[in-house]
Image (cartoon, rainbow, N blue to C red):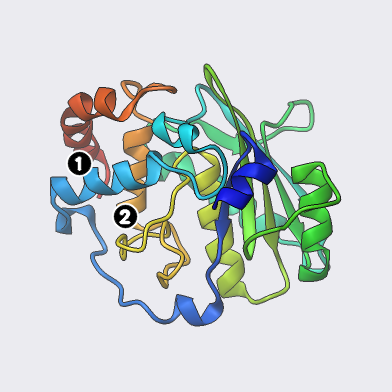
Amino acid sequence: MAAFRTIFGLMLLAVALATVGDLLSTPVRAESIVGFSDDELMDGFQKTVFGVEYGSASAGGAVKKFNGAVRVRVVNLADKDRQREIAGFVTRLPRLVRGLDIRMAAPTENPNFTIYVVDRADYVDTVRTDVLGSTHGAVPGQCLVRVYPGSLGIVRSTAVIVSDEGDGLFRRCMVEEILQGLGPMNDNAALYASVFNDRSRHSRLMPFDRALVSMLYDRRIRPGMTRSEVDTLLPRVLADVRRSVR
């Protein structure tokens, strides 16, 4: 971890380390947030929102989220074009995540979330060129997203997802990196009902994750808030999320 902090400075990276074997190894739990207690959901929020896999340790102490519209662009560099799958997922997100304004960017719009779809052979070069801006340094993970935080919220995010290593891994990376690019950047092995756990089997947006991201995108949770500031609001935010997320 210290080595990555030295290399990347204040850059915030979230990476997926899961393999196809990992995706088949963890039992599935509740298909509804009704099966989770308030303490479980609030603990999951704290574990994912406060923390980063790679980057500045201090950045993990504050809320990171877009403060406004998210507009997504896909740059396909792979033999198998996955743009329709990504667009389908992005199009569904506003119906699944309360408070999130996200859609594919129109040709005349400037995107603030760019997703590169690559074959594995081009993964390292694409990350170095289009994400890190350097031809040197280690490139972690099966796929990754870089978040550029600002004082008023996330300025932009850039993800790199591999297309040619199976549909399961592609879907897992697509869901995880898009969600993490929205702000909940940390993974935790205790979150067995979540994609925010590199050893879970999930390759779709789980109810647990819908609740966490809906809590994050509640208007009362603001970019830059500390853990203690969020703690006082979270029970009321979760109560409202429970009424709209099943």
Question: In the visual, does 136 lie left or right of 12?
Answer: right
Neighbourhood count class around disc 1 (C-alpha, 10 Å): few under 14, some 14–19, many 20 upward:
some
Q: Is residue 175 above or below residue 245?
A: below
Which sits in the foreground, 196 or 59? 59
- The Cα–Cα distance between marks 2 and 1, rounded to whole angstroms, is 11 Å
Query: What residue would you read off at disc 1?
Result: 242
Q: Is residue 214 above or below residue 25?
A: above
Tag 2 secondary structure: helix
Q: Residue at x 26, y 63 (%)?
A: 31
Q: Earlier in the sequence, mark 2 or mark 1?
A: 2
Indicate the position of residue 177 as horizontal and vertical percent values. Answer: 56, 52
Q: Residue at x 51, y 55 (%)?
A: 176
Indicate the position of residue 128 as horizontal and vertical percent values. Answer: 80, 50
Which sits in the foreground, 246 or 194? 194
Which sits in the foreground, 134 or 127? 134
Indicate the position of residue 172 as horizontal and vertical percent values. Answer: 53, 64
Q: Amino acid at mark 2?
A: Pro
Question: In the visual, does 193 lie left or right of 203?
Answer: left
Indicate the position of residue 77 as horizontal and vertical percent values. Answer: 83, 58
Instruction: Name the image quarter holding residue 78.
Output: bottom right
Query: What residue would you read off at disc 2?
Result: 207
Question: In the visual, does 240 lie left or right of 134?
Answer: left
- Among all residues in the image, which is located at the extreme top? 152
Q: Amino acid at mark 1?
A: Arg
